[in-house]
Amino acid sequence: MSTGAKSGKLPSSRGLTLLETLIALVLVGLLASLAVPTLGRALLVARQQRLASAAGQIFTAVRRYQADHGRPPAPGSLQPDGFNLRTLAPLADRGYLAGTDGILAQLKDGRVTAYDTSGPEGTGGFWLLLIDADSPELQILAASTDNFPLSPGHWLEGIYLLRGDRLEKLRGAPPLTGSEKDRADASGRGVPRG
């Protein structure tokens, strides 16, 4: 027997107490604190994969150029066929590399950070360093050389994540296609160790 029904009043619904509201907020905050670092790591891994893919595309283009010309592009855009850090010439303008705008948009200052070759006319290989535009701590090295400053005398071949002064290999060098390998062999100069 409800007195509210006899008096014509509806029974009042009970709201949340302050304690219940605080507990709910703490639980939501706890769940968010668990999700945010996971999301941050996932975003960093995605950036790393995207930058490594860009490095792989440039690496493959340099190797194709090297197979055709017997050497990678010379360092410095002022030299004939010199590598331009901002435009990726001669790779881009000679058809070795497509989609350069998308690649350059990912990079700090819209450019390859560093590029070098070693040996006479680059016969000792090449390396290039890419730094992510959004996460400058994310640095990717593409190398086919034994003359990278952090590991002179040790042959590097592939795509590496640079962490401080350590290198972590992400993947090996993509193989040359049959026609690229044939051109490298026919030139007599080939592609060093790859």
Image (cartoon, helix red, strand yellow):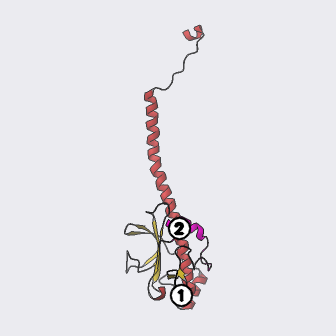
Where is residue 171 drawn, in percent x and y? Answer: 48, 70
Gap in angstroms between the C-alphas marked 1 and 2? 29 Å
Magenta stretch containing residue 102, yes or no? yes
Residue positioned 49% across, 80% down in the render? 76
- Disc number lying in front (1 or 2): 2
- Callout 1: helix, strand or loop? loop
Q: Is residue 103 left or right of residue 169?
A: right
Residue positioned 46% across, 42% down in the render? 31
Q: Amino acid at mark 1?
A: Gly
Q: Which residues are magenta?
A: 93-112
Where is residue 14 drawn, in percent x and y? Answer: 51, 22
> Residue 70's mark?
1
Q: Residues within 10 Å of mark 1 (few under 14, many from 20)?
A: many
- Callout 2: helix, strand or loop? helix
For this rendering, which residue is in front, 111 or 35?
Answer: 111
Q: Quadrant of residue 152?
A: bottom left
* Residue 74 vertical position relative to residue 106 in the rendered view, above or below: below
Image quadrant for the N terminus? top right
Residue positioned 59% across, 79% down in the render? 177
Where is residue 87 drawn, in percent x and y? Answer: 56, 74
Q: Quick check: can you spot residue 8?
A: yes
Q: Quadrant of residue 148?
A: bottom left
Q: Quadrant of residue 101?
A: bottom right
Magenta stretch containing residue 118, yes or no? no
Mark 2 = which residue?
110
Q: Quick check: can you spot residue 1?
A: no
For this rendering, which residue is in front, 109 or 24?
Answer: 109
